[in-house]
């Protein structure tokens, strides 16, 4: 019985951990209005099927190499999102290791849509 409880707690931590690093929607909207770049780390196919206007698609495996190609230097504010928030959390950690100081995880695509809507509502 203790094993079941331990597995449940571990699953809960794994499920909730990426969400702990999500920037609040209102703060992300303010940063986006102030000129932060919105980077979608989903695959090109996911991006082609649904995207946030103005978002830059840099798939997860190419983030480290392609950010500077897009002109996103380490001093630039960057908001990351993906389908669920897991890939964007991993990308955020990678960018922080590379010296990016102003990088935040928006989380899922649905949260990124809320950020976009909040940006439009506060104009």
Image (cartoon, rainbow, N blue to C red):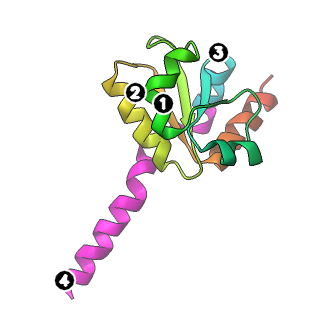
Pick whichever of labels 2 and 1 is earlier in the sequence. 1
Q: Is the magenta stretch mostly helix, strand or loop?
A: helix
Tell me the tag on residue 34. 3
Q: Which of marks 4 and 1 is nearer the N terminus?
A: 4
Query: Can you identify the residue that label 4 sits on?
Result: 2
Relative image position of residue 24 (x, y in whole percent): 55, 38
Q: Give coordinates of residue 13: x percent, y percent.
A: 33, 60
Numbered circle sitting on residue 90: none
Is residue 50 in view? no
Residue pointed to by mark 2: 95
Q: How far apart are marks 2 and 1 (CA)?
A: 8 Å
Please state which of residues 74 and 63 is positioned toward the viewer in this rendering: 63
Spatial separation of the CA atoms under disc 4 and disc 1: 41 Å
For label 4, the crowd category at 10 Å Cα-Cα, with few meaning under 14, some 14 to 19 and many 20 or more, is few
- Indicate the position of residue 111 as horizontal and vertical percent values: 63, 45
Q: Alpha carbon of mark 3 to alpha carbon of mark 1: how far?
A: 22 Å
Which residue lies most toward the left here?
2
Q: Are marks 2 and 1 in contact (CB under 8 Å)?
A: yes
Picture residue at 40% right of the left edge, 41% below the top: 90
State the extent of the magenta-drawn residues as a range: 1-26
Crowding at dot 1, Cα within 10 Å, few <14 / some 14-19 / many 20+, comes out as some
């Amino acid at each position: 019985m203790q094993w079941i409880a331990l597995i449940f707690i571990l699953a809960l931590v794994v499920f909730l951990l990426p969400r702990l690093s999500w920037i609040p929607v209102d703060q992300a909207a303010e940063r986006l209005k102030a000129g932060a770049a919105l980077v979608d780390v989903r695959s090109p196919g996911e991006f082609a099927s649904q995207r946030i206007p103005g978002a830059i698609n840099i798939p997860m495996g190419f983030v480290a190499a392609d950010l500077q190609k897009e002109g996103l230097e380490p001093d630039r504010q960057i908001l990351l999102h993906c389908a669920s928030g897991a890939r964007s959390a991993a990308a955020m950690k990678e960018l922080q290791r590379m010296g990016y100081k102003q990088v935040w995880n928006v989380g899922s695509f649905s949260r990124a849509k809320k950020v976009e809507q909040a940006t439009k509502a506060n104009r």
